[in-house]
Amino acid sequence: MGAGPWPARGPVLRCPAVRSGLALWLVCALACAGGESEPAPPEPVAAPEPEPEPDPFVEHTLQAGQTLWDVARSYGVTVRQVLEANELREADVRRLSVGQVLKIPGVSEAVEVREVGAPVDVSTLPPLEDAAYHVLAQGETLWDLAHTYDRSVGEIMERNEWHDDDARGLRPGTAVIVPGIAQADVRAADPDNGSRGFRHTVQRGETIWDLARSFRVSVSALMAANSLTPERAAGVREGDRLWVPSGARRSQLETRELSPRQRRAAARARRLGLGTVEIARELLRGRVPRRWKVAAGNADRLPGTLRWPVRRGRFVRGYGSGEGGYHLAMDIAGDMGWNVRAAAPGIVAYSGDGVRGYGNMVLVIHPGGWVPMYAHNSFNFVVAGEEVPRGGILAELGSSGISRGPHVHFELMHDGKNCDPAPLFRPGVRHESRLARIEPATWRRPDQRPASVACAPRRRHPRSRWVIHE
């Protein structure tokens, strides 16, 4: 189409040649005819959404002696909130340094974080609905609080969001959150019940492990009471004067008084026939009556997997190692004061040091009949008959018995044999800085053992009358 008889009004719009039919020609004609029209008004533009107000926060510079828990508590936030605001992992908590700047979310004003060891006024702390603050007195330990308020050590540590390292850093004046009580229920330390402890002069050849065993206190309690680093605790020398908190003098070594919950557990153990050295030896032979499996939770179904028993513990040696492959267990090393935790839920069958060679040992019966051993502990926190959850604190890692350093000797017994726990651990077998490449397995039916889980009868050391000679 060339120059056609189009009206002369307005700008002249030319349509391109149309070669694709009448419909396209009409579209073009209509478009050209509309050339005289006023342009359509622009669509109204919506006003931009106002920028949201940023969440309030302050920056806090860590001072000497301040912990993340102290900072979080002083600002009325949780440790988890501080970690998330600063994109930190739990492992980073142990790498915080003096002068590091932390973002504290949800607050608008800086506050003063009290100095470590300074008295604290609980009225200045954030109010609690499900717990209360107990301010530690000189010589009081985490074990004392658990006993006084009929709570487990694990419950108190979890409520305070503590890592194992935190327990050995407790000082007089620290405000500890005790779950399940009101502030009116908080009790002052009784100076007549031995909770304030006494001074001890280290004798020739005594180690921190010897003191813990002799005075029936945990290594972490000794470290906290004397502000000892792991290196200093490992190197105590003759003539050192150490404060022994909450312990009994050598001439007064008797069974520690049980808390109400532990008395109930001991009564349960007596009804079931658990708790004696004879029973421990029977369990080591793999004899687990059905009533004990039922008491553990289920007689016919296993937990399936195991939890790594020391959170940051390191693999030392495994199943089938040692001369002649006698070592049908796994050794997991760790630092002084770290805790040993239940690999699965169950009931404590034995807690004591009556089986020679193993030192302080805990045996737990799990549903379906698994019986793991946790040996060489410096201190056992549980008694026979206690029900423990997966991850519940059983003991403090140590070097009692025939041992060459702080570690837990972990055996998994089932149906009269020792089994390799490696494929069952979750998240896996932990080495110094990585997880071992082991194909994971799950074992739920007692009679359907995975092929990757090897089992064999217990073996003696080739040159020792004892099963374990480390």
Image (cartoon, grey):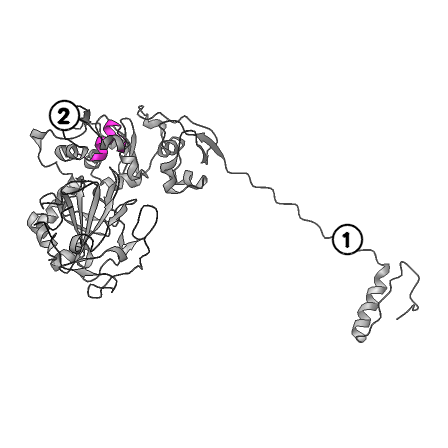
**Is residue 162 or residue 129 the one in the foreground?**
162
Residue 316 appears left or right of 21: left
Residue to which mark 2 is pinned: 192
Residue 467 screen position, x and y as percent: 11, 51
- Residue 328 visible, this angle: yes
SS label for mark 1? loop
What residue is rendered at 46% in x and 33% in y? 107
Q: In which quadrant is the N terminus drawn?
A: bottom right
Amino acid under label 2? Asp
**Is residue 318 or residue 76 the one in the foreground?**
318
SS label for mark 2? helix
Q: Residues within 10 Å of mark 2 (few under 14, many from 20)?
A: few
Q: Relative to 289, say whether 218 is above or below.
A: above
Magenta stretch: includes residue 139: no
Which contiguous range is marked in magenta?
A: 217-230
Q: Relative to 176, say whether 459 is above or below.
A: below
- Residue 273 visible, this angle: no
Residue to which mark 1 is pinned: 41
Residue 405 screen position, x and y as percent: 20, 40
What residue is rendered at 45% in x and 42% in y? 87
Magenta stretch: includes residue 221: yes
- Compute the Cα span from label 1 to label 2: 91 Å
N-terminal of the two: label 1 or label 2? Answer: 1
What residue is rendered at 33% in x and 51% in y? 435
Q: Residues within 10 Å of mark 1 (few under 14, many from 20)?
A: few
Amino acid under label 1? Pro
**Magenta portion: prevailing SS class:** helix
